[in-house]
Amino acid sequence: MKVLSIIFVLLLSACTTTTTNNNKQVKEAMAYGTLTELNKFDEHIEKELLIRLYEVPNNSINCFVETHGICKYEYFLSVSTFDEYPEVDVFKLSISGKILNTAWIVVEQPDYAEIVVTYSEYTNEAYENNKALDKKLLKTELKISLDGIVENTI
Amino acid sequence: MPAIPNKINDVVIEFSPKVNRNVDQKIIDALKIVIKKTIVKGKPLNKIYISSANDQHKIPSRHVQGDGKAVDISRINGMKMSVYYPSSPEVKAITDAIQTEFESYKYRRENFGPLFKKKLGKPKAISGHGDHIHLSVN
């Protein structure tokens, strides 16, 4: 029973991201988003995938007082295998806000990666403008493969 | 990281001047399995030519991933595959045997050459590789 309960809780806190078909958002991410090469971090860890993070403003949310600004960012990950003819895909993360840190986890498994992402629910500019926003840091573990991304809230 | 030696199982290894021989240990282990004098009965393998290892490529190629996880072999017993694979039974037999033998290696990944093109044991529809064997490891 205890095991079943644990599995149930894990299922509740995990969500799987599949390939994105949102061409408009992908275009926005490529056109004016901020690109971060995640493989340049944690150099001591050998990476099994080539992963790029695209940060793009979410323009549908308004949290600023008496002005307009970026409340949250949305995120896309492009994933590539290391090959002469790589397998590739692009995934939209379910988390949003402002990613502050990414930390790779050592996993010696081909075509697979685990990254812990630390992020805030809103941008720093939003917190400074609107003191009513609850400032808290969140952590999510990303389990990344070409089949999809599993996001586990830590 | 270890370097590809000048001889493996009594077979001479020659290198293009551009080759960086320092590679992942798994590549050397793979070469020890597939480079054998007696890989084809009656057609001794005396010499191979490595045209690329940990060099001349860009990410995401496995040639330059980590410590270097791919190697290209383009000549058998001094004969270029591009010229002799179609016409020399010796070059064809040895080239085919190297590709076939590599499939038994635990960490084999890409196996592209004149005989077939496979990735992780499954056929891969790509062009090229008629003039060399590209072998990479996980």
Image: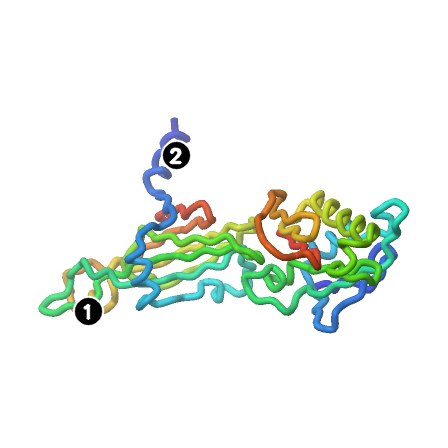
Single out the residue that lies furthest toward the front.
B87
**Residue behind mark 2:** A7
Percent position of residue B78, x then y = 83, 63
Query: Within 10 angstroms of label 1, few (less than 14), some, or many (20 or more) residues?
Result: few
Tell me the chain of label 2: A
User: Which quarter of the figure is the N terminus of chain B placed in?
Assistant: bottom right
**Residue behind mark 1:** A128
Q: Residue at x 36, y 62 (%)?
A: A54
- Of residues A114 and B67, the one nearer the viewer is B67
Percent position of residue B89, x then y = 82, 50
Single out the residue that lies furthest toward the top.
A1
Tally the marks. Answer: 2
Single out the residue that lies furthest toward the bottom.
B17
Contact between labelled residues 2 and 1, with CB atoms less than 8 Å apart: no
Please say which color scheme the image uses.
rainbow
Amino acid marked by disc 2: Ile
- Would residue B61 be found to the left or right of residue B50 on screen? left
- Of residues A134 and B24, the one nearer the viewer is B24
Q: Residue at x 35, y 43 (%)?
A: A15
Q: Residue at x 40, y 46 (%)?
A: A150
Q: Does dot 1 land on a helix, a strand or a loop?
A: helix
A126 lies above or below B90: below
Q: Do the residues indicated by labels 1 and 2 lie within the same chain of the protein?
A: yes
